[in-house]
Image (spheres, rainbow, N blue to C red):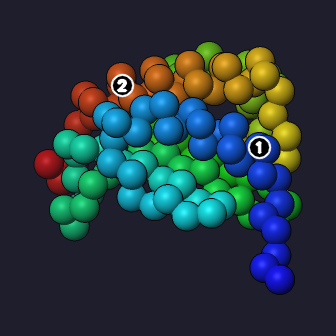
Amino acid sequence: MPKAEPFPETFAALKGILKAHAKRMIVTVDKPGNFQVASPTLKDRKGRPLFFAAVKTNKSTVSYHLMPLYGNKALRAKMSPELQKRMNGMACMNFTTIEPAQLKELAAITKKGIAGFKNVKLPWA
């Protein structure tokens, strides 16, 4: 019997944030426990679509990776203390569960991140 994925509700809620924007992005990975989206216009150094965000199920948490947080201190500064406590590095947050208010805030941050990501100046472009 296959092992059940841990944290299915948390993964589904976080994936829902990214799925809401999937029509404007490129879905690069859509597997159980792993959902990733990339920019449809920006490319990395090797010419692949530039990574934007991901939701991944780990052993003890569900990680939400949002690259616009990495390069945008103003966006990180607007995050509530509750979300800031979940930060692991500059662009990753870890959850076991997520409150509706946090989900709503994260959806808004993701939307702002998409808007700002369109104007990113890449050193190799």
Please name the residue shown 69% across and 37% down the image. 13
Q: Residue furthest front?
A: 1
Residue 3 falls in image quadrant = bottom right
Q: Position of residue 103 (x, y in %)?
A: 70, 26
Q: Secondary structure at mark 1?
A: helix
Quarter that holds the N terminus = bottom right
Q: Which residue is mark 2?
A: 116
Crowd class of label 1 (few under 14; some 14 to 19; many from 20; radius 10 Å): many
Between marks 1 and 2, how big is the CA–CA gap? 26 Å
Q: Nearer the viewer, mark 1 or mark 2?
A: 1
Please name the residue shown 65% across and 61% down the image. 33
Disc 1 marks a residue whose amino acid type is Thr
Disc on res. 10: 1
Q: Residue furthest bottom?
A: 1
Disc on res. 84: none
Q: Do we see residue 92 in this rendering? A: no
Residue 5 falls in image quadrant = bottom right
Crowd class of label 2 (few under 14; some 14 to 19; many from 20; radius 10 Å): few
Please name the residue shown 49% across and 46% down the image. 53
Disc 2 marks a residue whose amino acid type is Gly
Q: Position of residue 109 (x, y in %)?
A: 55, 23
Q: Do we see residue 15 in this rendering? A: yes
Between residue 98 and residue 46, name the one nearer to us: 98
Between residue 1 and residue 123, name the one nearer to us: 1
Contact? badges 1 and 2 (CB < 8 Å): no
Please tell me how many numbered marks the rendered image carries: 2
